[in-house]
Image (spheres, helix red, strand yellow):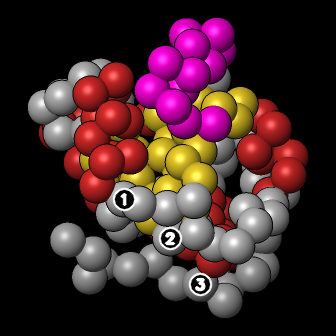
């Protein structure tokens, strides 16, 4: 996916992120063409934190105890980039993006443009174990992640 100049803030809705098979790889890719990358959700903070830790995602921002609308408004005010893109799914997410001044990108379109695989999220350890079963031992599971 070509994000342009790299002067972009990219926010993923947690539910959209859960539609991607390798969320850790998604964030690694997104950091190549985005200045800031994070996750927003209506879920309690611990739900987002558990997901991002399990998938070894280092985010620049998250919604915390705020709702999604307030989070997008605050992130846009805090991170002064040329573009603010919200990756979500469904009409409700599109309306939220429009009402907060963000560009909306459906997760399916983002996945197609960036060559990300849709599917049940796998942790890096699960992906490494699957690769090992296929004979690819290039990645060993890590036990040093917090």
- Badge 1 or badge 3: first in the primary sequence: 1
Residue 101: percent from left, percent from top: 51, 31
Regarding residue 104, the answer to whether it shows in the image is yes
Q: Nearer the viewer, residue 124 or 44?
A: 44
- Badge 2 or badge 1: first in the primary sequence: 2
The crowding category of the residue bearing disc 1, from other C-alpha atoms within 10 Å (few below 14, some 14 to 19, many at least 20), is some
How many badges with numbers are in the image? 3
Are circles 1 and 3 on residues that touch, CB within 8 Å?
Answer: no
Residue 21: percent from left, percent from top: 65, 47
The crowding category of the residue bearing disc 3, from other C-alpha atoms within 10 Å (few below 14, some 14 to 19, many at least 20), is few
Task: Please name the residue shown 41% across and 53% down the image.
Answer: 38
Q: CA distance from mark 2 to mark 1?
A: 9 Å
Local SS, label 1: loop
Q: Nearer the viewer, residue 25 or 61?
A: 61
Q: Nearer the viewer, residue 63 or 127?
A: 63
Residue 72: percent from left, percent from top: 37, 35
In the rendered image, which residue does mark 3 sit on? 139
Which of discs 3 and 2 lies nearer the camera? The answer is 2
Residue 82: percent from left, percent from top: 57, 59
Task: Please name the residue shown 86% across and 46% down the image.
Answer: 112
Local SS, label 2: loop
- Badge 3 or badge 2: first in the primary sequence: 2
Regarding residue 51, the answer to whether it shows in the image is no
Q: CA distance from mark 3 to mark 2?
A: 27 Å
Q: Is residue 73 left or right of residue 105?
A: left
In the rendered image, which residue does mark 1 sit on? 79
Are circles 2 and 1 on residues that touch, CB within 8 Å?
Answer: yes
Q: Dividing the image into 4 quarters, which one contains the N terminus?
A: bottom right
Report the span colored magenta. Answer: 90-103
């Amino acid at each position: 996916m070509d994000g342009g100049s790299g002067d972009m803030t990219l926010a993923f809705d947690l539910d959209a992120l859960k539609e991607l098979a390798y969320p850790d790889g998604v964030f690694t890719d997104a950091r190549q063409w985005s200045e800031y990358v994070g996750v927003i959700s209506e879920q309690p903070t611990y739900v987002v934190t558990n997901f991002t830790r399990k998938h070894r995602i280092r985010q620049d921002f998250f919604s915390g105890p705020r709702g999604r609308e307030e989070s997008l408004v605050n992130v846009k005010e805090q991170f002064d980039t040329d573009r603010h893109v919200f990756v979500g799914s469904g009409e409700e997410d599109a309306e939220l993006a429009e009402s907060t001044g963000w560009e909306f990108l459906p997760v399916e379109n983002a996945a197609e443009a960036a060559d990300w695989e849709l599917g049940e999220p796998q942790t890096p350890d699960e992906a490494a174990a699957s690769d090992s079963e296929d004979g690819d031992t290039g990645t060993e599971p890590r036990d040093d992640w917090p």
